[in-house]
Image (cartoon, rainbow, N blue to C red):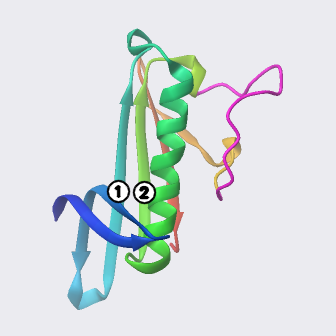
Amino acid sequence: MDLETRCEDVRGKTKFIDITCSFPNAAVSCAIELKFKTTQQGAQDHGRIDAYVDIEAVELVCESHFTFGRFFMITDSSVYVNTSRRGVGTEWHCRLSHNDLRQSGGGNFVALVTGGGVV
């Protein structure tokens, strides 16, 4: 297991993945991105974009570097959880849609979990 793994030449750029782990005997490797956003941090539009950038990074490195990936986000802000009522918001062209998110947890925080890559 490694923290902040540098992945070279991902669409011509260098990407850093929060956590990576591999099991060479099983030929399995995983890329994990983490995000923690609270309502007090403000600028939810920037937080949403940051989350989609991380999701895209997991998808891209799973195409060439890892067997599968995961994205985990913990938040107490409904902005990240609820679908837009006006039909506007951040649109990012990746394999993830709002319906692909799984919500878990209770209390004041909710965890958003999604998978990326080949599972």
Residue positioned most to the right? 86
- Tell me the residue at 41%/44% (across/down): 72
| Image position, residue 108 (x, y; %) | 41, 14
Along the horizontal axis of the image, is 59 left or right of 4?
A: right
Which span of residues is magenta-colored?
Answer: 81-95
With respect to residue 103, does 58 lie above or below?
below
Q: Name the residue under label 1.
A: 32
Residue positioned most to the left? 2
Magenta highlight on residue 83: yes
- Which is nearer the eye, 12 or 57? 12
- Tell me the residue at 78%/27% (across/down): 88
* Residue type marked 1: Ile
Location of residue 19 (image quadrant): bottom left
Residue positioned most to the top? 40
- Which is nearer the eye, 45 or 111? 45
With respect to residue 59, does 80 lie above or below?
above
Q: Name the residue under label 2.
A: 70
| Image position, residue 10 (x, y; %) | 44, 70
- Which is nearer the eye, 32 or 5? 5
- Tell me the residue at 39%/74% (across/down): 9
Quadrant of the drawing holding the N terminus: bottom left
| Image position, residue 38 (x, y; %) | 40, 18
Task: Please report contact status of discs 2 and 1: CB closer than 8 Å, yes or no.
Answer: yes
